[in-house]
Amino acid sequence: MEIKYKSTDSALIANLSGELDECTAEYVRMSLDTVLSDLRLSSPAKVVLDFGSVTFMDSTGIGVLLGRYNKFSKQGIEIAIKNASGHVDRILKMTGIYEIMPKIS
């Protein structure tokens, strides 16, 4: 798993690449938590998770997303998901993640 960050006027974009599973969950969790610490000191108050290059995700990945949602929302930071497709998109739909983290284009 690799995460590259890009800041725009309206959001911080996190481009995820690879598999989000038990082996990579801790890295993703720590990386996003570091971003949360940085966002507390500045704006924007929105993070977009770009799943365009995520090839696989399991229930551990869902746990990471839910945990980050809880932490970020307590700080007033919105999270949205972009470019999820195939297997990953189906999992996000089935678990109801899109109800708390909107899917954007």
Image: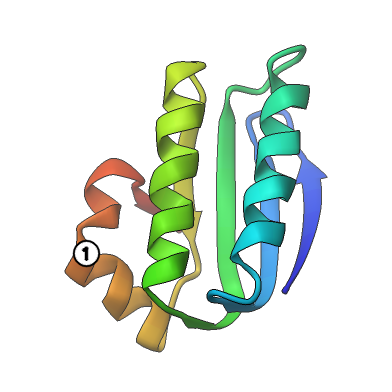
Question: Which residue matches tag 1?
Answer: 95
Q: Is residue 35 left or right of residue 48?
A: right
Instruction: Report which quarter residue 22 is drawn in.
Output: bottom right
Q: Is residue 11 above or below residue 96?
A: above
> x, y percentage for residue 43?
70, 18
> x, y percentage for residue 42?
76, 14
Name the residue rendered at 40%, 57% in the picture: 63
Image color mode: rainbow
> x, y percentage for residue 23?
63, 76
Q: Is residue 90 left or right of residue 69?
A: left
Name the residue rendered at 57%, 47% in the picture: 48
Q: Is residue 68 left or right of residue 5?
A: left
- Which type of secondary structure does the marked residue at label 1 adopt? helix
Where, quadrant-wise, is the C terminus in this rendering? bottom left
Residue sitting nearer the eye, 75 or 86: 75
Name the residue rendered at 38%, 47% in the picture: 66
Residue sitting nearer the eye, 12 or 22: 22
Q: Is residue 13 visible?
A: no
Q: Is residue 84 left or right of residue 27?
A: left
Instruction: Report which quarter residue 10 is drawn in.
Output: top right
Q: Amino acid at mark 1?
A: Thr
Neighbor class of circle 1 (other Cα within 10 Å; few <14, some 14-19, many 20+) is few
Name the residue rendered at 45%, 72% in the picture: 84
> x, y percentage for residue 53?
63, 78
Q: Is residue 13 above or below residue 96?
A: above
